[in-house]
Image (tube, rainbow, N blue to C red):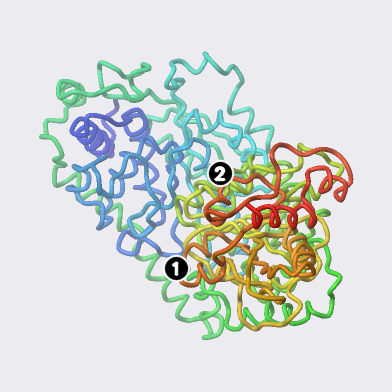
């Protein structure tokens, strides 16, 4: 290695990482050892951040997409002076309860922007952050918003399909404030990259419209020069940094074992001898640590100047910027939904479920201008663009991102927008295609990001497109995901109520699931309360006598349950209808409320989906009317008849249970 004056700073990253991994008895040394010089160049000469104010809104964002190499990020945060990442926390790497977890867990106050680990998610999140930055810069101006998003990237991130989706779309949108630092070490966990790929990876970026630099990743000056070029180029940039995996560990460097082979004390000793680092484990010499801390203060003056610009704004402009960046919705935003809800009673014939959501969002657009919509090439059938301008390379002030047929990166982009802050992101597609963005949805739930995943075409009710597009099993799978609200509104009133609850929810994602077919009005009496916010409620109580039967339903099947109730009541059977638009919210209610809603007699649930999950609400005298397998191609009414999801079938099941 060269005797570059910053080389000891790179070695400090290496040895903090080695010592932490040796103590933990496991970890991934390949990334922090191979990317030490890359990180040193970025953090000491280019990165805009302020460790004393980790959540400064105009900071550069850094994403460790190759999250298994988490000690790279933890070392950088400790060395540059992030208060939470103490030496003790470094020493507790991978221990239960430690901040320095096996993979980075989102905590912006600690300097960790997003949770990473599933490869490809990080670069797609970084893409979303760059979209958010460009949109906010177009809206508020570069005096307040003017920062870069950098991502450390491994081979696996670029092999995942979401990586190619990101490359294509980011190049098309010319996101010049997005920079990827690729650890081009020619090694994966299995061995040489030539085992599984043969294409020229930088050329994939070039044909997608990226600025590409190929360089020696262990040459600090070369990395810094490439970063300077990247920051000047109007295109997104890939810095293809050729590196040696596990550099500095004689036994494994440049080999498959450099990725995550078990390290021992002897490996640490051999590295110290090879690199001339005589210091004991976890000791960074004072002059090196001070150089790092000075690097952490390099943006202090810029931070202070930015604060002055913010304070100098007219009060109304300052308040609006702060409101948006703090994630506060504007005063009175609920009135739009309440007015819509009141008007719904003038349209009892109803309209397509997804069109109800589209209409609501069109009304919200001028009220919540920070709301951005991503859609996967389904603008016409989902209709969530309407009055919005497209976000394009020429017009980054547009709030509608045409994602093409790229559901995975669309979901991950929405996560990146939410993690960046200042954006209320929506991701719109058909429910059957949610499986393409499932990894992003899981990460949104894991990180507690307030992303709104909006789905149309939610059942066999779509009709002739057939079973490929009829998602009979997906509601159950989404409901099984921790920290994910799943909302399936029954009509225009519930659509407004669910959107109100979803927008107010800031601690996790929401899946809003809408039918393609017309949803007739089932809430025929106006109620100013948000009944859907309790997850479930009695839509119609028994009228002809004491309640004997409770019919439970969601979405398009609520109207069917109402029709079944009419049949039962005509026969003298006291029957209530319960709408359960959001199980997660209903489960949060107290036991007395849940019991009062569900009743104690016969219960029949009906949903044009699989039974899984419903038994929690059916009790000892309960049954389910729904799907037992995949759907078929045909008109929707014929499919409901074919699969026995009818008012008559529901009523018959209730009679059977009463007689049992």
User: x and y percent of residue 170 in the render?
Assistant: 64, 44
User: Element type at marker 2?
Assistant: helix
Can residue 20 be seen at all in this image of the molecule?
Answer: yes
Query: Label 2: which residue?
Result: 124
Rendered image quadrant of residue 582: bottom right
Residue 444 falls left or right of residue 17: right
Q: Is residue 257 above or below residue 147?
A: above
User: x and y percent of residue 383 in the render?
Assistant: 79, 59
Q: Residue at x 17, y 48 (%)?
A: 88
Rendered image quadrant of residue 207: top right
User: x and y percent of residue 169 in the render?
Assistant: 67, 43
Q: Which mark lies nearer to you, 1 or 2?
A: 1
Rendered image quadrant of residue 392: bottom right
Q: Residues within 10 Å of mark 1 (few under 14, many from 20)?
A: few
Looking at this view, is 128 or 161 the one in front? 161
Total numbered badges shown on the rendered structure:
2
Q: Residue furthest bottom?
A: 315
User: Element type at marker 1?
Assistant: helix
Image quarter of the N terminus: top left
User: x and y percent of residue 526 in the render?
Assistant: 71, 82
Query: Label 1: which residue?
Result: 591
Looking at this view, is 655 or 2 the one in front? 655
Q: Is residue 69 above or below residue 500?
A: above
Residue 73 falls left or right of residue 212: left
Q: Residue furthest front?
A: 659
Mark 1 to mark 2: distance in Å?
Answer: 42 Å
């Amino acid at each position: 290695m060269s005797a570059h004056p910053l080389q000891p700073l790179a070695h400090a990253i290496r040895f903090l990482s080695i010592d932490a991994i040796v103590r933990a008895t496991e970890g991934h040394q390949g990334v922090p050892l191979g990317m030490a010089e890359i990180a040193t160049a970025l953090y000491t000469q280019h990165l805009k951040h302020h460790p004393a104010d980790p959540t400064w809104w105009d900071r550069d964002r850094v994403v460790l997409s190759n999250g298994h190499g988490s000690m790279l990020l933890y070392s950088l945060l400790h060395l540059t002076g992030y208060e939470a990442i103490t030496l003790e926390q470094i020493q507790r790497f991978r221990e239960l309860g430690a901040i320095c977890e096996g993979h980075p867990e989102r905590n912006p106050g600690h300097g960790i922007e997003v949770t990473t680990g599933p490869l490809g998610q990080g670069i797609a999140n970084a893409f979303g952050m760059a979209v958010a930055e460009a949109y906010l810069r177009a809206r508020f101006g570069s005096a307040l918003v003017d920062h870069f998003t950098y991502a450390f990237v491994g081979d696996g991130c670029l092999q995942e399909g979401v990586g190619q989706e990101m490359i294509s779309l980011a190049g098309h949108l010319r996101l010049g404030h997005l920079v990827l630092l690729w650890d081009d070490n020619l090694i994966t966990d299995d061995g040489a990259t030539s085992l599984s790929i043969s294409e020229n990876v930088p050329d994939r970026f070039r044909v997608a419209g990226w600025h590409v630099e190929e360089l020696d990743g262990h040459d600090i000056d070369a990395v810094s020069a490439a970063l300077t070029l990247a920051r000047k180029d109007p295109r997104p940039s890939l810095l293809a940094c050729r590196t040696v995996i596990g550099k500095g560990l004689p036994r494994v460097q440049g080999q498959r074992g450099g990725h995550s082979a078990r390290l021992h004390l002897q490996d640490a000793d051999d590295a110290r001898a090879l690199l001339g680092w005589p210091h004991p484990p976890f000791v960074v010499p004072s002059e090196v640590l001070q150089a790092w801390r000075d690097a952490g203060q390099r943006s202090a003056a810029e931070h202070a100047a930015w604060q002055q610009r913010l304070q100098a704004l007219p009060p109304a402009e300052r308040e609006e910027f702060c409101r948006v960046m703090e994630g506060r919705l504007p005063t009175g935003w609920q009135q739009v939904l309440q007015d819509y809800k009141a008007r719904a009673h003038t349209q009892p014939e109803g309209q397509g479920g997804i069109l109800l959501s589209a209409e609501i969002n069109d009304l919200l657009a001028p009220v919540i201008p920070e709301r951005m919509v991503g859609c996967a090439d389904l603008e016409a059938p989902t209709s969530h663009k309407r009055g919005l301008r497209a976000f394009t390379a020429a017009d980054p002030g547009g709030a509608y991102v045409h994602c093409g047929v790229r559901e995975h990166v669309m979901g991950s982009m929405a996560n990146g927008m939410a993690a960046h802050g200042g954006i209320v992101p929506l991701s719109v597609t058909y429910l059957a295609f949610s499986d393409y963005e499932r990894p992003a949805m899981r990460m949104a739930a894991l990180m507690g990001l307030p992303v709104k995943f909006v789905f149309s075409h939610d059942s066999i009710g779509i009709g002739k497109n057939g079973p490929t597009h009829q998602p009979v099993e997906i509601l159950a799978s989404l409901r099984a995901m921790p920290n994910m609200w799943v909302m399936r509104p029954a009509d225009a009133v519930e659509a407004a109520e669910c959107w109100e609850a979803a927008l107010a929810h800031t601690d996790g994602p929401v899946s809003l699931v809408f039918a393609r077919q017309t949803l007739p009005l089932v809430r025929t009496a106006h109620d100013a309360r948000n009944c859907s916010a309790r997850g479930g409620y009695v839509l119609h109580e028994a009228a002809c006598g004491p309640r004997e039967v409770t019919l439970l339903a969601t979405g398009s099947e609520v109207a069917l349950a109402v029709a079944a109730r009419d049949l039962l009541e005509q026969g003298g059977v006291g029957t209530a209808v319960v709408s359960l638009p959001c199980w997660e919210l209903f489960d949060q209610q107290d036991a007395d409320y849940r019991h009062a809603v569900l009743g104690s007699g016969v219960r029949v649930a009906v949903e044009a989906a699989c039974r899984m999950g419903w038994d929690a609400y059916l009790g000892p005298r309960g049954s389910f009317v729904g799907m037992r397998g995949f759907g078929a191609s045909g008109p929707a009414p014929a499919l409901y008849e074919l699969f026995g999801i009818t008012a008559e079938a529901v009523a018959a099941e209730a009679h059977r249970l009463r007689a049992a």
